[in-house]
Image (cartoon, rainbow, N blue to C red):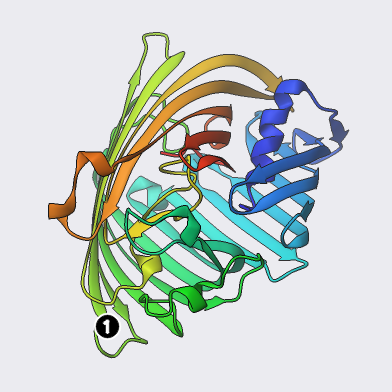
Amino acid sequence: MTILRGIAIFIVCLLAGGGAVRAASVWAETQIFPIPSASTSKNDGNDAGLIVPILITDPDGELKYLLAPMIIQNSIVGARGTFNLFRYDTGGRQMQFIGSFTERIERKLVFNYTDPAFSDGRYFLNFGGSFFKNATSRFFGVGQSTVEASETNYTAREARANWRFGVYANEVTQVAVGQRVRQVSLQRGATDLPFTVDRFPTVDGVQGESIIVGHRATFYYDTRNNLFSPTDGMAVTAYAEVNQNIRNGDHPVYSRYELEVKKLFPSESKRAILVVRADLQATIGEQVPFFEQSSLGGQNNLRGYGVDRFIDKHLISVSVEERIHIARAKIAGVAADFEFAPFLDTGQVFSDFKDVSFKDYRMTPGVGFRGIVRPNVVGRIDYGFSKEGGAIFAGLDFPY
C-alpha cells in the first residue's frame, strides 16, 4: 500500500464535500479535514481508517504546507500510523518527509528535497534517502510469459540514498549527473503466498544481500509549462547508468539505459489534454538482480496489473491518456481543478530485442480521477483492467 494513497483519496473525497476546521495561524489560513478512508489494492489488501490532512497557505493564498497524519487498519499488515509532510516554496522547490510504522513488519522513512532553480535558476539539485520494509511485494518469475499461478510474496527490505546535480544549457535543456546507493535483501512476507526465496532460489538477487552503487548521466529536454501539473509541451529524458553490485564478485558491473518521451496535446480551451508517453528501457550485463531489471505493472505503467507483475531485462511501453476537466472548486482558500482521465496502457518486457512481438503486448484500459491544486499538488486514483482482473492505484502525482 503506498503511503500517499490516503492523501489522494482525500483530495478526491472533496468532490463529495467534507467538514473543514479553521485554525488560527501565522499563515493566511490553515484548514484541517478529518476524512474517513477506505481503499483496496491488488497486492496490498484492504484499508480502513482516518486521515487528517492539514493545508496551510501563505498570505497570498498559495499552498505552503501539506501535512497528513494517518491511522489505517490494513487487512494484511495490521494497524499503521503515518505522518506525511510536504513543503512547497517558490521556484518549484519541494521538501518531502514520510514516517510510517506498521503493526506487522512494515516500516518506512523517506526524505527528499528538490530545487529545480538552484542558484538563481542556473542548476537543478535533488537529494534524498529512504529506508523501508514492504511486506506485500510480489514476484512471478522473469519474463513476459509468467502466469498468475506462480505468484510469490516477500518483504523487500531496502535502504536507499541518491543525489542529482544538473546544469541548464538553456531554458529547456539540462544535463545532469548523479549517484545512487541501494541495499536490498529479501525477507519472509506477510501473506500466505509461497515465499519467493523458496520458490525461485536460483533467480539473481533472491539470495543474500545486494548493494548496488549506480553512476548516471542524464539528458533532459523539457518544454512543458509546469514540472508537476503541465497542460502543454513535451519532455524527453535519456539516461545511461553504470552499476556495481559490490556483493557479487563474479559479474559486479552492468549498465542500464532509458529513453522516455512524453507529449501533451491540449485542446484550444485546455479543458481536454491528450497525453502520450513512450518508454524504452534496456539492461546490459549478466547476473542482474531481478529488482534492478525493467518491470511492467503498477501506478505508472500497465495499470491493470499489480506492481512489478512482469520483469525482464528490457521494456517497451506506450500509454495514452485523455485528461478532461470536469469541475473547479475553492478548497481551503485554494483553487482546485478536477479531471476525469480515461487511459490505455500497453507494453511488454523481454530478454532480447529479437524476441519483440506485437502478439506479446499486454493492454490495460482504465479510468482515472484527479484533484489538482496548481502548480504543485496532484492527487489521483486510477483503475486499470486486465485479464487478471483489475488494480487500483493512488498517489500525489501524474502517472507520467
Q: Nearer the viewer, residue 289 or 65?
A: 289
In the rendered view, tell whether residue 124 sits above or below residue 226: below
Q: Pinpoint residue 288: horizontal percent, then vertical percent.
A: 30, 73
Classify 10 Å Cα crowding around label 1: few (below 14), some (14-19), many (20 and above): some
Depth check, front residue: 68 or 193: 193
| 298 to 10, vertically: above or below | below
What residue lies at 43% left-to-right and 67% top-to-bottom?
Answer: 162
Query: Can I make out residue 307 in this image?
Result: yes
Q: Does residue 335 sit above or below 395 in this rendering?
A: above
From the viewer's perspective, is 289 left or right of 184?
Answer: left
Q: Residue furthest bottom?
A: 249
Q: Amino acid at mark 1?
A: Pro
Q: Residue at x 55, y 22 (%)?
A: 339
- Name the image quarter holding the C terminus: top left
Residue 111, picture quadrant? bottom right
Q: Position of residue 318 (x, y in %)?
A: 30, 37
Side (left or right) of 92 relative to 329: left
Where's residue 237, x and y in %?
27, 46
Residue 218's place in the image compared with 224, above or below, is: below
Q: In which quarter of the view is residue 292 placed?
A: bottom left
